[in-house]
Amino acid sequence: MARRLSGEQIIGFRHGAETDSTNDTLISAPRNGRGKRQSGHTAKARFLGCLLGGAVGDALGAPVEFMSRAEILRRFGPKGIARYSPAYGGLGTITDDTQMTLFTAEGLIRGWVRGCFKGITTYSGVTAHAYLRWLQTQGERPTCDIDFGADQPGWLFQQRQLHSRRAPGNTCLSALRAMNSLGESARNDSKGCGGVMRVAPVGLFAWRLRQYESPRDAFRLGAELAALTHGHPTGALTGGVLAVLILALTDGASLREAIAVSKDVLSQEPSHEETLRAIELAEELAASGLPPEEAIARLGQGWIAEEALAIAIYCALVARNFKQGVLLAVNHDGDSDSTGAIVGNLLGTLHGVKAIPAQWLEPLELRDVITELAQDLYAFKDWEIGEYSDNEELNQRIWRKYPGF
């Protein structure tokens, strides 16, 4: 078993209620209805669309991640890249963006499982542990002695295809190597996009926990998880924004409504100005009628957090459909896989999995694993597990798959 977890978000679980991490008071169970009612089928399609859409955008951008737009057009023609091209030895292969997104989702589920069995949990701590398992898939370990629980590695770590380096971000690697305790924020001043590009599962998880009445909870958790590797305020706050965007879209909001909610929460945070300016510039350019290639160039290249988020928001706003939005997001100077992944998360959540072209889904690497994880991220709240459960077979099966540490 891993050593005792640390972190600020300690939540005690009880049936029908949970404690607020900010003041340890009891939050009553939310009302049954939502502002925009939708069927379970629609919600499940949004979960699948979010994670599969992000992976598709990531895989489309992977071959051109380090190319300029001019280089992309020279190689792929005047419309740029429009289908999977070879990368990392295959077609439809994902990068570190999707790898870390999957470990985010797994960490959140394992945090929930821990709460059910132990009565207390820390989502930032348990997800930090998930990121350290990702670090291990990259052939590295942290400098401090943190028990990986090698005798109970869990289901995701056992997916051998994940044990492959796909241009992992130097900041993520160095911050995780230097982590002294689970849940502590990074001791750097980086605002690279490696924090925001992996936190979309936070919005899905928060919606399933029925925390949609308080977007601030989702924002706080998204920012905390981004801050595990990126210590600059913008590197963390952009993670909070994406979490709220996904939360609102999952709940049936329009994209513009989701942006308005995220801006409202963001504006109450210290040091929010840089992130807010980037979002508002994306909105202005989307309404300007400027050609997309010029608008995206004004937003930046996406290597830093606020630029990646702004490019994704812009592409989602101007796109007629999922396909157009993702193609806009990968055919530019800069970090094409990260901007493709984020807009894929947004449009996949907004439109559901059926909006993703079949020719992009079918060859997608780890499609079955991503699908199963998305399904579990939707289903976990209904698992009758824990110390008071009479279903010992289910208890053991879930603990083997998602050990609570």
Image (spheres, rainbow, N blue to C red):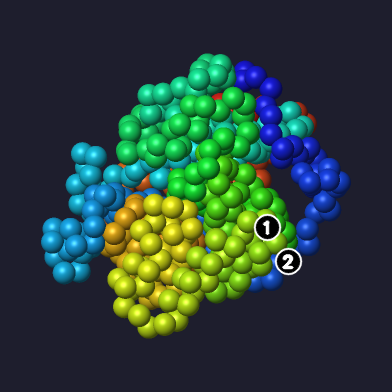
**How many numbered marks, from 0 up?**
2
Task: Depth check: give the residue in front, 312 or 67.
Answer: 67
Q: Is residue 199 above or below residue 103?
A: below
Residue highlighted by disc 2: 33
- Label 1 or label 2, whichever lies nearer to me, is 1
SS label for mark 1:
loop
**Numbered circle sitting on residue 269:** 1
Residue 352 at x, y = what percent?
46, 63
Left or right, 231 with reference to 358? right
Looking at the rendered structure, the kind of residue marked 2 is Gly
Q: Quadrant of the N terminus?
A: top right
Q: Earlier in the sequence, mark 1 or mark 2?
A: 2
Q: Is residue 396 above or below residue 81?
A: above
The structure residue drawn at horizontal position 40% and vertical position 66%, both measured from the top left corner, is 299
The structure residue drawn at horizontal position 41% and vertical position 82%, both measured from the top left corner, is 288
Residue 322 figure quarter: bottom left
Residue 331 at x, y = what percent?
27, 62
Residue 394 figure quarter: top right
| Circle 1 crowding by C-alpha within 10 Å: few under 14, some 14–19, many from 20 | few
Task: Depth check: give the residue in front, 373 or 340.
Answer: 340
Looking at the rendered structure, the kind of residue marked 1 is Glu
Residue 351 at x, y = what percent?
46, 67
